[in-house]
Image (tube, helix red, strand yellow):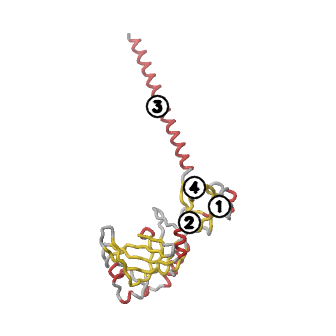
């Protein structure tokens, strides 16, 4: 009886080991498949990169893309525009890439050296510094005066001054871009000096080139953890105000400022 029991125990132990091995094999196969799926997904990963040369050409073949010149059926991107690249790294000096239009997706390749993770802001910063030097403090609306109360009822000395400021793209609200070239947007400012309550002021900018680029999709702004687009604006109070009904049905009065010049990473644009 004792020998028979020992034999039964040994057989049971062997079955447990077999089951454990089977489970291990299943888990290992599942992990291997998951890694394979992850690698395949990474190869198809889409990432936006920025053009840092005057022009980037997306061409159907890698050889054409390396020339970075006009190519049959290709698409050009201007400085500062975003290009959707595919995968984790460039291959032999070119990125697999794609663009979309009404006909669907168009895959191709773009020269890697004309793209970068972040846009080139060299020209933007250089022009901003020029303006900072050209417009003396006595000709500017001071930061303390950038509030709803002072802009609705400007002191006499404020009427002859201009607002010179950087605006993050995320601060631009209620944007409307008309085909005629008139661009309007609002920005929140304190209701009065030292107040933590904010209200909107409205900017008006007339520039057909800026509007055309925006409506045509060649101008788009980005804001994320590592980078956020800025605009550098010179604007003058007009003395006008608009009445606008907010989401709660309350009529709000917005002072209007006319933008004389707007700089973004795509270029410098002057109001007409």
According to the picture, the residue beneath numbered tag 4 turns out to be 104
Dot 2: within a 10 Å radius of its alpha carbon, few (fewer than 14), some, or many (20 or more) residues? many
Position of the N terminus, as image quadrant, is top left
Closer to the chain start, of discs 3 and 2, is 3
Q: Is residue 101 above or below residue 179?
A: above
Q: Which residue is mark 2?
A: 81
Look at discs 1 and 4 and give the one toward the viewer: 4
Real-space CA distance between mark 2 and mark 4, rounded to the nearest whole angstrom: 20 Å
Residue matched to label 3: 23
Q: Which mark is drawn over residue 74?
A: 1
Q: Earlier in the sequence, mark 1 or mark 4?
A: 1
Q: Nearer the viewer, mark 1 or mark 2?
A: 1
Q: Which is more N-terminal, label 4 or label 2?
A: 2
Percent coordinates x, y for residue 155 in the rendering: 35, 87
Comes first in the chain, label 1 or label 2: 1
Q: Nearer the viewer, residue 260 or 131?
A: 260
Decide which of 269, 38 is in the foreground and name it: 269
Q: CA distance from mark 1 to mark 2?
A: 16 Å
């Amino acid at each position: 009886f004792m020998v028979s029991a020992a034999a039964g125990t040994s057989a049971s132990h062997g079955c447990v080991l077999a089951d454990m091995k089977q489970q291990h094999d299943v888990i290992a196969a599942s992990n291997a498949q998951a890694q394979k799926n992850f690698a395949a997904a990474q190869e198809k990963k889409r990432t936006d990169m920025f053009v840092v040369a005057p022009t980037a050409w997306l061409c159907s073949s890698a050889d054409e893309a390396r020339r970075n010149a006009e190519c049959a059926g290709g698409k050009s991107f201007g400085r500062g525009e975003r290009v959707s690249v595919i995968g984790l790294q460039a291959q032999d000096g070119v990125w697999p890439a794609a663009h979309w239009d009404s006909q669907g997706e168009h895959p191709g390749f773009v020269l890697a050296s004309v793209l970068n993770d972040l846009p080139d802001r060299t020209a933007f910063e250089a022009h901003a510094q020029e303006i900072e030097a050209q417009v003396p403090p006595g000709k500017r609306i001071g930061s303390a005066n950038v509030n709803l109360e002072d802009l609705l009822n400007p002191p006499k000395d404020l009427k002859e001054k201009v607002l010179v400021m950087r605006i993050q793209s995320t601060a631009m609200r209620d944007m409307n871009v008309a085909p005629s070239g008139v661009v309007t947007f609002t920005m929140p400012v304190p209701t009065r000096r030292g107040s933590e309550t904010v209200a909107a002021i409205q900017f008006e900018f007339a520039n057909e080139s800026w509007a055309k680029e925006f409506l045509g999709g060649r101008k788009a702004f980005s804001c994320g953890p590592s980078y956020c687009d800025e605009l550098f604006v010179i604007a003058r109070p007009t003395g006008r105000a608009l009445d606008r009904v907010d989401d709660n049905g309350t009529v709000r009065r917005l002072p209007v400022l006319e933008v004389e010049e707007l700089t973004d990473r795509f270029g410098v644009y002057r109001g007409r």
